[in-house]
Every structure is written in structure tokens, then in C-alpha cells.
Image: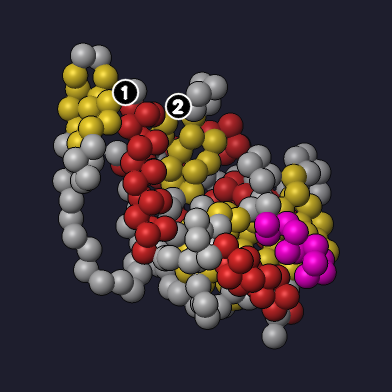
Amino acid sequence: MRFVEAAPELPALPLEVLDIPVRFRDGFLAATLPSGELVEGTPNHVLSAMHRIILADLVEGEPGAPFLHGATVMIGGRRVLLVGHKGSGKSTLALHLALAGYDVEGDEHLVIRDSEVVARPRTLRVKEGSLHLVAKLPDQVWQAPSVHNWDGSIVRSISPAVGGRPWAIRPGRLDAMVFLVANHGGRSAARPIVSKDAFGRLMGEVMLPRTGVAAAAGRLRQVAVEVPAYQLLLGDLATAEWHLSSIASQLT
């Protein structure tokens, strides 16, 4: 269960501690969820159930809000959203930035509220096969909790505090959006994109609420119009970091 652990500093009401008993039975794990539901199966199956109830609880607490899939990082005091399809290198880039001293808030969802945004507390999920792309990995990375994917690959759950800075999440404004396009083995290059293009890309990476879809989509459209957007062809991480720093420095 350490794989799903997330303990950032964040302003919130005191949380209630709930015990989730897990036992080994007949060759499988059996976990009793807070709702009383019994989940039985392999470790990965139980882990998926944990992810499901955590997300369901978050969605229930943010009614009507769209959830954008992406990582958020503070660069030069600016909050930048990194958006990318699976395999684009988003989590690997977030790990590189955390180790370079930037404050990474989360690596999964950004909740779009009426007048602010806030990252969903979740660690960086990095495939072990991608770790060789990141320079000077500390021992904490190799000691981080891990699971085996369906294809046999290993995924590690790495705290954004791995770079030595506290992991903190604060609600606030979104200053820029950067859409990642994989360019594995190549150079990184960035360019601005127009709001219409940004909105179309956001719609491909959003989880809309079950009710109030039109209002949520309108909120997303407002973000696309008001927040500067860029495309980052993501190749080498050092140049990608330079582009992100340059983008943040130009924001007003």
C-alpha cells in the first residue's frame, strides 16, 4: 500500500484516519474498504481498487469541476501544467524537474475550480525503463515503492520531495499550459499555440463531471482562452527544462 501513499503539505481540514484491513487468504489478498466492500484478488487488483476509491472521494469533494490529466510544477513562481498522452515522457520530465530543485505539485490531475486550480495529491509514477534518461538519480528513487505492470515492466512511485524540497500543494492560479509531444532520442523544442488548438487538446485530456457537463466544459474553455499555451516537443530533458524556464520567465 506504500505505492499509493501521498503525504504533501496542503491547506485542508483535519483528515479522518481510516484503517483498511488487508489479509492474505487462499493465495490472494483481501481488503475491506471503508464502505464495507470486500475486494479480493492479486496485489495489483487491490491496488486498483485503492486508486478507484481515492479518485471517487476526490471527485465527490469537487462537484462540477473538470479534472485535467497532467503534472503541475512551480517554475520561477509560476504554476505550469504539463499535459501529455501516456508515453509522452510527462512523469520522467516531472522527476527531472523535481531533482533539479523545482516544486512539483502532482503528476495526475489538476482540479479546475471557479477561480483557482489545485493539484491532486499523487506521487510520480515512473517506469523503471525510463529512469536511465534522468541524470544523477539518488538512492531514494531506487528505494521507492514499486509494482509490476501487466507487461512485466516495473513502475516506481516517487515522491516529489525526492529532490530535497518539501512536497507542498497550494491552490492558486494556472499561469501556463505546456502540451508534450514525444520526441524520444531527439532534441526538445517549444512553440506557442493558439487558444482554439489548446482547447481541443485539453478536451482530449479532461475528465468531466457526470452532471453539469456544459458548465464544466465552459470553465475549461475559459482556461484555454485565458492561460498561455505552448507545445513542447519533448526530447532531451535538459533542453526541455531550459524551454520551460524560458516560458515561465516571459509570463506577465
Tell me the quarter of the image containing the N terminus: top left
Judging by the rendered image, the residue that carries numbered circle 1 is 41
| Secondary structure, magenta segment, majority class | helix
Which is nearer the N-term, disc 2 or disc 1?
1
* Residue located at (45% from left, 74% from top): 171
Q: Between marks 2 and 1, how big is the CA–CA gap? A: 15 Å
* Residue located at (70% from left, 78% from top): 226
- Residue 49: % across, % down: 35, 37
Name the element at disc 1: strand
**Please, is residue 48 above or below residue 83 in the view?**
above
In reply to whether residue 201 is colored magenta, the answer given is yes
- Residue 224: % across, % down: 70, 70
* Residue located at (74% from left, 68% from top): 229
The nearer-to-camera label among 2 and 1 is 1
- Segment tinted magenta in the rendering: 193-203
**Which kind of residue does numbered mark 2 sit on?**
His
Q: Is residue 179 left or right of residue 35?
A: right
- Camera-nearest residue between 101 and 193: 193
**Which kind of residue does numbered mark 1 sit on?**
Gly
Observer able to see residue 163: no
- Camera-nearest residue between 73 and 137: 73
Q: Tell whether label 1 touches label 2 (CB within 8 Å).
A: no
Report the residue that reaches farthest toward the bottom: 252
**Please, is residue 49 above or below residue 94 in the view?**
above
Name the element at disc 2: strand
Residue 148: numbered disc? 2
- Residue 2: % across, % down: 31, 41
* Residue located at (19% from left, 22% from top): 24
**Please, is residue 165 above or below residue 24 in the view?**
below
Judging from the image, the colouring scheme is secondary structure
